[in-house]
Amino acid sequence: MTSNSSKATRAGFLLLVVGAIVVGIWWWANTPSDTDTDSVVRVVYKANANYLIYFVAKENGYLRDAGLQVREAEMESTNLMIQALSSGQADFNPSASAPALYAAEQNAPGMFKFLFITLMESGRTNNAIIVRDDAPIDSLKDLRGKKVGSPPGATSLVLLKLIFADIGIDTANDLIVQELEPRTQLQALASGHVDALFAIEPIITLGAEKGISRVLEAEPMEKHVMDPIPIAGGVVSAHFAQSHPEIVARLKEAMERSIDFIRRNEVESRSIMAKAIGMPEESARRLGINTYWKTSEVDKLAVQSLADLFLQHGALESAVDTRAMYVGNLP
């Protein structure tokens, strides 16, 4: 009899192959043949608040100033973005989520390198569990046996598992979790297709403004997992870092300029984010903003602790040594 783990492994492999083919076709069709490969960076990203650092770098011309030619692809799936990096079809993800990244790293150690770390911390975050405005639900424990919508991909599923494990709820047995694309999440909540959403901005603010939803619990990741939580990072493929060290150095410098700008100019940074994700600027002023660690500032123990937590709760099958996952730690 084939185990569920073996089935999952085969399914994951097939998804990786299909994802690589899809992403490869996209890049083949959209990358000009006459580009200067000494300055091209192929970027994959999502149009959400977690990619603020990239939006600032583009808007303020930091990538251009660094002499970089950006070829970008917007993707809804975190897994597809990781697959693009793994297969050599992309070079840089400005906000690669830690759960998906470590899941890939455990199977092929040494494939990814951090340029910086993205943090979520209490008081400055953009995640929440939301419910319908009129729902008779008062706490996370009231969601036992109910349907919870989640952004697609392994990242959100792992985080949900950790959040609910902290209050004694097993997402596999006590909840019905449904992955939903961001564009369908509020509709699913309003129609009763799901009872709650694990949401990130701009979904949280838009739902409240439209009278659809209210926040059941703000900052669940920080409250139940870790605070601050090194939830993501700017990541390049190790192959790209080895073969184009000068480009990576310029890219790292451009992104650190973005970090400095965000630290000094939060109001203007929110305006840039609103423009990038198609959100009213007035709404964006109420959003939390991620904070960042440059590689010279990283608390490497905290980063490793999160990977160890994933292993402890079964989100990883083998240990991941994050200490080797930084630009500069190359063979």
Image (cartoon, helix red, strand yellow):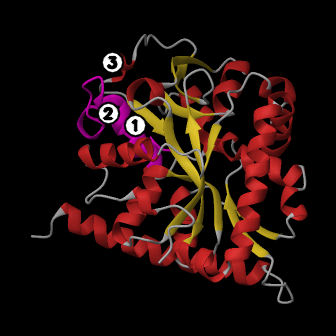
Q: Taking 94 as reference, is 255 left or right?
A: right
Q: Which residue position is annotated with label 2? A: 175
Direction bottom: furthest residue: 33
Q: Taking 173 as reference, is 228 left or right?
A: right
For the image shown, how many numbered marks are present on the structure? Answer: 3
Q: Which residue position is annotated with label 1? A: 160
Where 123 falls versus 327 (above or below)?
above
CA gap, disc 3 to disc 2? 11 Å
The residue nearer to you, when weighing 118 against 177, is 118
- The reply to whether dot 3 and dot 1 touch (C-beta < 8 Å) is no
- The reply to whether dot 3 and dot 2 touch (C-beta < 8 Å) is no
Amino acid tagged 1: Leu
CA gap, disc 2 to disc 1? 10 Å
Residue found 31% across the figure and 50% down from its top: 315
Q: Taking 166 as reference, is 177 left or right?
A: right
* Residue 49 marker: none
Query: Residue 314 at x, y = what percent?
Result: 25, 49
Amino acid tagged 3: Lys
Where 314 falls versus 2 (above or below)?
above
Q: Is residue 144 magenta?
A: no
CA gap, disc 3 to disc 1? 13 Å
- The reply to whether dot 2 and dot 1 touch (C-beta < 8 Å) is yes
